[in-house]
Amino acid sequence: MGTPSFGPALPDDTRRLKSPTALRIVLGTQLRRLREARGVTVAAARKAIQGSGAKISRMELGRVGFRERDVMQLLTLYGVSAEEERQAFLTLVRRANVPGWWYQYSDLIPSWFEAYLGLEQASSVIRTYQPQLVPGLLQTQEVARTVIKLGHPHQSADDIERKVALRMTRQEILTQPDAPLFWAVFEEASLWRLNKNSVTREQVQHLIEIAELPNVSIQIVPIYSRAHVGAGGPFTVLRFPHADLPDIVYLEQLTSAVYLDKTEDVKLYIMVMNRLCTEAATPTQTITLLNDTLKKL
């Protein structure tokens, strides 16, 4: 019986993944499938690379960087001898170990948010609900600066400006080739929390303009709306163009974040998002609401 082939042949959907975070998850999934297909235990895999069982688990979850030597030793243990397949794995390892563009900001952002940036960059669909603020991918520079100052009142002016630059660079994902579909739902009250009419006017105008992009949908929950299913807090659902990357729900907290990928959890949040979309103003109604807001400023 021949050895089953689970190695990454680098199909188009893998080549399109530019985020090292996503590539590590794909690589880890491939290694786990190979191990399970060959009936190799975690203990045996750990012994092959002279590491711990925890390291094998972290590798298979894509939560650590990969050493080429470790991957080659695991492939040998799993019976992968074809040179073309081994080289495909090596290519994936090298791509997964290339730092993302956000690496230059790593001294400013926590590791749990670095992980989100990598997943965001790899996504094909981003759906987000924000009850308090205009979503970060839609904020103007001045609004981003105001929000960042509120959250980090003791940081230096230089660090604040670098964080603003990071947020502005993130926004380029919406206009790049193969941009993800971005679907945002947020509360109308978010617009009125800005401290100056001029800032609000600029933000509202920006929302009207960016909503013209074919991959962007914006829905606002009007102030007069009653309590709704999104009252529990903000969340983001990410979907990816690769079968080895499951949908992920991102829940950000003050000092950490939670990533949910269990099917039942993701289904619940997608259901909530769908209900929010039916309760909010439609994208067309939202543009009307935004134009009406401009008249009041």
Image: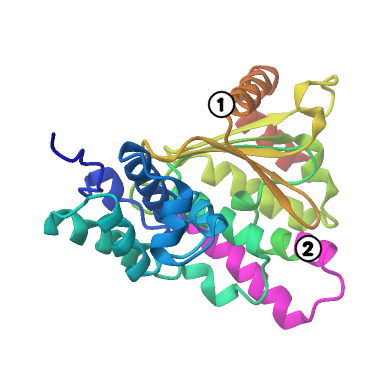
- What stretch of residues is rendered in magenta? 147-173
Estimate the x, y position of residue 115 in percent, counting from the top left: 57, 57
Q: Is residue 165 left or right of residue 134?
A: left
Depicted 232 relative to depicted 157: above or below:
above
Estimate the x, y position of residue 92 in percent, counting from the top left: 30, 59
Q: How far is the residue under mark 1 from the one under mark 2?
A: 37 Å
Residue located beneath label 2 in the image:
146
Q: Is residue 156 magenta?
A: yes
Depicted 217 relative to depicted 210: above or below:
above
Mark 1 falls on what kind of element? helix
Q: Amino acid at mark 1?
A: Thr
Is residue 293 in view?
yes
Q: Main secondary structure of the magenta part?
A: helix
Mark 2 falls on what kind of element? helix
Residue at 46% from the left image edge and 58% from the top image edge: 46
| Front: mark 1 or 2 | 1
Residue located beneath label 1 in the image:
263
Q: Is residue 22 left or right of residue 112?
A: left
Q: Is residue 187 left or right of residue 62?
A: right
Name which quarter of the figure residue 262 lies in: top right
Q: Who comes first in sequence, dot 1 or dot 2?
A: 2
Name which quarter of the figure residue 237 lies in: top right
